[in-house]
Image (spheres, coloured by chain):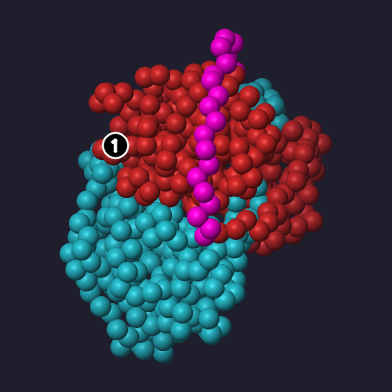
């Protein structure tokens, strides 16, 4: 079966972000960018399905300006076969992302669509769920294990109380959680090979989708800073402070 | 519907026996919307009448819509979202706590209604404007939604719980189920059973990280938590290393907590962990590395060997 993986270019998760002083957003100029960690896990899972003989082709798709081709090439180097760049000037909102992905899906039939559960910039955690609604397909969010068995998939999900397992009819939409797998590093030969793998560019118009937004970010602010704390020298001092100063014990 | 009317439906999360603490907090948040006619609550479950009764007694609740059927014993997003979307059309605001339950089902509801969603909100400023954390809580975004139905999930650690009120009980209305679309089946759930308080409800959380070194040593965290009547939490590193189960992970993509007292033991304080606990009232950090980033958010920091510190601390609290 064909597997579709959607990936997003985000600020590197280990970078300390800076809020612009005019409140318009977060500084991204000259800031290190990366593939969203959950999307990396999705690419890795798709490549493993191919290695297991379950998937025969992995297509990776990303929505954004031309800079996201860097992450598409990285995904090709990890083992994806083809890449699709949907060229949109500004990152669309999740509902539009889901509509664009639905349009991509309508061009070919995929047995499985894998996405990261959330992107570490907007932290929305919505696209997979929305795509499942638009396509009328089964949904397995926060997956920590995926087992494809014929025309169903057993998905174990990390939920608040522990682990829940569901059985989904395929095709299905799955969003990855942290412990689904540990992504590989691309080898240099694979990075070189990736340059020759196909990367197609399309616009939202080509897919028949109008990019629209129903939400407006009015301001981006730094959260109030915590008051600086103190270092204590002993357990006795700590307990004393907690009892008598902080009054939490 | 009058263009200024605000009508609110909150989707309750429960275990068919009691309503969750996260839902009580989402309900409190919903009060900030100042609904024109009180809050409606949707309860989908199986043999869940005690949940309905608890909700009927709460402040500000107008009615409880109940779908009691085997189909909702272990509600799945595919079927539950159809029910919520059907009922949701009559409201201006659809709300759930941002738990894995709410996060799973609400965006599916939003897309069924062809609207966006506001995830994990920490403040409601008006019926159209909310504040939500982005970039692991290192920035806050003030967002306006122009959708005709506003679907929101609420970060429960940012709100208190709704209280029981004296006075009239809210009305109860039975609603029909939405037939199972047959896309998915519940197979099983492995829950961590514990007598300890759950993370979202606990006044005290003692959390352990990689510094504890082993599953056996994690007992130190448990002993301190038990002495303080608190919950236990963990960093991603501790979960990945197998010291504890995944549901104890505190962090950007795990549990977000804001207890009165958070004690971080052997946790370095990565950005992603801080996202899950930096709004705690009092933070204590115990770590052998004086440069560990956790000390930057701690109110009280103690540098030293946790294997010496912890037994002494357990003894003296």
In this picture, residue A222 sits left or right of residue A234: left
Question: Residue drawn 44% across and 31% down?
Answer: B9
Quick check: A49 above or below B233? below
Main SS class of the magenta portion in the image: loop
Residue named by callout 1: B148
Question: Residue drawn 52% across and 38% down?
Answer: B176
In this picture, residue A41 sits left or right of residue B73: left
Q: Colour of chain B?
A: red
Q: Colour of chain A?
A: cyan
Specify start and end residues of the magenta stretch as a single range: B159-183
For the image, the number of numbered tags is: 1
Q: Nearer the viewer, residue B286 or B23?
A: B23
Quarter of the image for residue A187 reads bottom left
Q: Nearer the viewer, residue B248 or B280?
A: B248
Residue B130, image x, y percentages: 35, 34
In this picture, residue B173 sits left or right of residue A126: right
């Amino acid at each position: 079966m064909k597997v579709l993986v959607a990936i997003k270019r985000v600020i590197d998760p280990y970078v300390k972000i800076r809020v612009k002083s005019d409140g318009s957003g977060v500084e991204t100029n000259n800031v290190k960018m990366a593939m969203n960690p959950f999307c990396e896990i999705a690419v890795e899972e798709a490549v493993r399905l191919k290695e297991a003989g379950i998937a025969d082709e992995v297509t990776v798709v990303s929505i954004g300006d031309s800079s996201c081709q860097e992450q598409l090439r990285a995904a090709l180097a990890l083992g994806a076969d083809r890449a699709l760049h949907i060229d949109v000037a500004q990152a669309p909102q999740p509902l539009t992302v889901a509509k664009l992905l639905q349009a991509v899906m309508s061009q070919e039939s995929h047995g499985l669509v894998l996405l990261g559960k959330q992107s570490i910039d907007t932290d929305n955690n919505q696209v997979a769920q929305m795509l499942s609604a638009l396509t009328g397909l089964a949904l397995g969010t926060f997956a920590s294990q995926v087992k494809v068995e014929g025309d169903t998939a057993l998905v174990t999900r990390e939920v608040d109380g522990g682990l829940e397992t569901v059985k989904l009819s395929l095709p299905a939409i799955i969003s990855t959680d942290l412990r689904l797998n540990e992504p590989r590093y691309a080898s240099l030969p694979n990075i070189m090979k990736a340059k020759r793998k196909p990367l197609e560019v399309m616009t939202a118009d080509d897919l028949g989708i109008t990019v629209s937004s129903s939400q407006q970010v009015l301001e981006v602010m730094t959260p109030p800073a915590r008051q600086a704390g103190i270092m204590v020298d002993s357990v006795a001092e700590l307990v004393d402070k907690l009892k008598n100063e902080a009054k939490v014990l | 519907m009058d263009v200024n009317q605000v009508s609110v439906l909150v989707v309750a999360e429960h275990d068919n026996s009691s309503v969750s603490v996260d839902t009580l907090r989402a309900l409190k948040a919903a009060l900030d919307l100042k609904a024109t006619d009180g809050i409606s609550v949707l309860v989908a479950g199986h043999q869940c009448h005690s949940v309905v009764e608890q909700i009927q007694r709460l402040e500000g609740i107008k009615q409880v819509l109940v779908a009691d059927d085997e189909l909702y014993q272990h509600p799945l997003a595919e079927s539950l979202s159809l029910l919520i979307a059907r009922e949701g059309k009559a409201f201006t605001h659809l709300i759930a706590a941002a738990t894995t339950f709410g996060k799973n089902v609400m965006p599916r509801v939003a897309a069924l209604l062809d609207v966006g969603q506001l995830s994990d909100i920490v403040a409601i400023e008006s019926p159209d404007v909310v504040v939500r954390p982005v970039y692991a809580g290192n920035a806050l975004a003030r967002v306006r939604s122009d959708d005709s139905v506003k679907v929101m999930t609420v970060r429960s650690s940012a709100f208190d719980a709704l209280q029981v009120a004296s006075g009239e009980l809210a009305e109860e209305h039975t609603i029909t189920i939405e037939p199972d679309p047959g896309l998915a089946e519940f197979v099983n759930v492995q829950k961590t059973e514990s007598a300890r308080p759950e993370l979202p409800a606990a006044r005290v959380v003692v959390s352990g990280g990689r510094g504890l070194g082993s599953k056996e040593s994690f007992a130190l965290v448990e002993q301190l938590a038990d002495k303080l009547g608190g919950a236990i939490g963990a960093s991603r590193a501790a979960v990945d290393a197998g010291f504890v189960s995944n549901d104890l992970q505190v962090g950007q993509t795990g549990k977000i907590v804001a207890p009165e007292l958070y004690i971080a033991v052997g946790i370095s304080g990565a950005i992603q962990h801080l996202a899950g606990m930096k709004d705690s009232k009092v933070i204590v950090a115990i770590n052998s590395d004086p440069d560990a980033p956790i000390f930057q958010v701690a109110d009280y920091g103690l540098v030293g060997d946790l294997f010496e510190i912890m037994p002494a601390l357990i003894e003296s609290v």
